[in-house]
Image: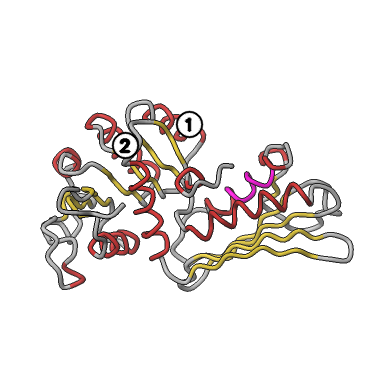
């Protein structure tokens, strides 16, 4: 979508606007020709409240960071949210009330919380994905293809690494990788996942999907899926060097939601990878 004199720019609100991901989103919106930052949210008590959301760029966006949900969201047609599950659901309730469409990059939702999101999707359009990166989602498609071809005789391990500040493990992306693989093989991840190994574990059980987690430094996000067979190994890896890829993917999701009235979608829908 290209903005013209007759095409209004997409009005976007950003949750957690003064955080690391929030700032990447603000910068991506500021650099976009068809999007505009119309509102910015942060927690009550944040020292950033009342300041321009793009001040860190030396720019004036006209959107002051605020904590009043109704006030902020009434100025937007879309919300991009990379916060925490409880906060996202609070934001989503107001978005459903106001008809604001939502791009959710938050991870760590429980099954009950996912059910709440699905209920809200009956009132507005929601794009929920554990990773907005175009490359990661193409990787998921490759994993789907590999899992179908390597459905017997291969042990599957998923290794992920993130920065030391990440609070959930395994990452939402790693879990999504496991879900994609399990579904491609006609199974469910909850029946196959092994999240911990310690002490005398015995031999590896057949058909399990193992997870390993690394946390340290400022690693943005590395994911490797290993298919280990007899005499060969296939490794499919994606490495992120910047959160900018998540921000650009989020804007692609916004453009997709602009054509949807309601319903729940993911990045496979956005990137037309469903076929």
Residue 228, image x and y in percent? 80, 60
Of residues 60 and 167, the one drawn nearer to the viewer in this rendering: 60
Secondary structure at numbered mark 1 = helix
Residue 177 among those drawn in magenta: yes
Front: mark 2 or 1: 2
Of residues 268 and 181, the one drawn nearer to the viewer in this rendering: 268
Secondary structure at numbered mark 2 = helix
Q: From what the image shows, is residue 188 above or below residue 171?
A: above
Q: Provide the residue span drawn in magenta.
A: 176-182
Gap in angstroms between the C-alphas marked 2 and 1? 15 Å
Which labelled disc corresponds to residue 267? none
Question: Where is residue 128, by image quadrant?
Answer: top left
> For mark 2, what is the residue?
92
Name which residue lies at 29% across and 40% down: 91
Specify few, some or many for label 2: CA neighbours under 10 Å numbering under 14, 14-19, or 20 or more.
Answer: many
Specify few, some or many for label 1: CA neighbours under 10 Å numbering under 14, 14-19, or 20 or more.
Answer: few
Name which residue lies at 23% across and 54% down: 3
> For mark 1, what is the residue?
112
As drawn, the residue found furthest toward the right would be: 230
Name which residue lies at 50% across and 53% down: 168
């Amino acid at each position: 979508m290209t903005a013209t004199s007759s095409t209004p720019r997409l009005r976007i609100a950003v949750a957690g606007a003064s955080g690391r991901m929030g700032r990447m989103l603000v910068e991506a919106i500021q650099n976009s020709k068809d999007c505009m930052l119309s509102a910015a949210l942060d927690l009550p008590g944040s020292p950033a409240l009342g300041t321009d959301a793009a001040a860190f760029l030396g720019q004036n966006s006209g959107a002051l960071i605020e904590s009043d949900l109704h006030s902020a969201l009434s100025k937007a047609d879309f919300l991009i949210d990379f916060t925490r599950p409880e906060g996202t659901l609070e934001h989503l309730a107001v978005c459903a009330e106001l008809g604001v469409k939502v791009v959710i990059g938050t991870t760590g939702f429980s099954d009950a919380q996912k059910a709440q999101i699905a209920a809200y999707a009956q009132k507005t359009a929601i794009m929920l994905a554990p990773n907005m990166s175009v490359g990661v989602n193409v990787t998921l498609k490759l994993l789907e293809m590999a899992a179908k071809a390597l459905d017997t005789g291969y042990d599957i391990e998923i290794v992920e690494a993130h920065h030391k500040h990440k609070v959930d493990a395994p990452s939402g992306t790693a879990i999504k990788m496991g879900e994609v693989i399990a579904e491609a093989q006609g199974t469910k991840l909850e029946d196959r996942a092994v999240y911990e190994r310690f002490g005398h574990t015995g031999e590896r059980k057949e058909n399990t999907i193992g997870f390993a987690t690394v946390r340290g430094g400022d690693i943005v996000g590395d994911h490797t899926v290993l298919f280990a067979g007899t005499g060969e190994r296939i490794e499919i890896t994606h490495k992120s060097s910047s959160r900018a890829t998540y921000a650009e993917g989020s804007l692609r999701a916004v453009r997709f939601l602009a054509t949807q009235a309601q319903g729940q979608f993911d990045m496979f829908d956005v990137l037309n990878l469903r076929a």
